[in-house]
Image: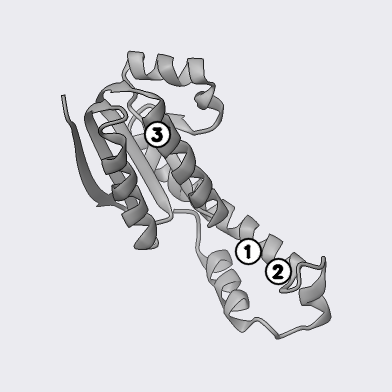
Amino acid sequence: MALELTVTEEQGVAVVALAGQLDSRTAPELERTLLGLLGEKKHEILLDLAALEYVASAGLRVFVMVGKRLQAEGGRLALCALEPGVLKVLEIAGFVQLFPILPDRREAIPWLLANARAGRIGNLAGELLRGEDGAAGARFRRPGTDRERAAYAAELLKKGDP
């Protein structure tokens, strides 16, 4: 069976619903779709796996690659509505510790929004503390050198929890 992907947006979260089988033949399609979302600056991505019947190592590789890229950019990848067989594969592979797994979209979207925001604040704080030259505290020795990051930090801190 082929893989069917449906991409929607809910409350600013990109939701990708997968149906069918995710294997070495179909993983490149998922990878292209997710990389396209990253290119559109989507930082919160939810994979709805309610209709995913099978996942192979090629699909798991895509999850890891996209999850790492999102984390580096202060975003998050979460999974929801896993079928028992797919959940078992993730457990055996040790992936249940790598990704947040939530029961359904209703719970996953608010969780993802709150935790992605915290991740962006953490990444920004790290950048500010490291400075342009990578030295700890460099930003604080040169106040006012990064107005864009300061404005972004203020914007993130002003927003209430979603």
The secondary structure type at the circle numbered 2 is helix
**Left or right of residue 124: residue 70:** left
Residues at marks 3 and 2, CA–CA distance in whole angstroms: 31 Å
**Residue placed under numbered mark 2 in the picture:** 128
Image disc number at residue 79: 3
Residue 84, quarter of the rendered image: top left
- Where does residue 47 sit, x and y in percent of width and height? 34, 38
Asked whether the viewer can see residue 111, the reply is no
Which comes sooner in the sequence, label 3 or label 2?
3
**Left or right of residue 105: residue 70:** right
- Where does residue 11 sit, x and y in percent of width and height? 32, 53
Pointers 1 and 2 in contact (C-beta within 8 Å): yes
* Residue type at tag 2: Leu
Asked whether the viewer can see residue 36, the reply is yes
Camera-nearest residue between 74 and 156: 74
- Where does residue 34 sit, x and y in percent of width and height? 34, 48
Circle 2 packing at 10 Å, graded few (<14), some (14-19), many (20+), is: many
**Left or right of residue 130: residue 5:** left
* Residue type at tag 1: Leu
Residues at marks 1 and 2, CA–CA distance in whole angstroms: 6 Å
Which residue, as the protein is rendered here, is positioned at the far bottom? Answer: 144
Which comes sooner in the sequence, label 3 or label 1?
3
- Where does residue 21 sit, x and y in percent of width and height? 24, 25
Residue 42, quarter of the rendered image: bottom left
The secondary structure type at the circle numbered 1 is helix
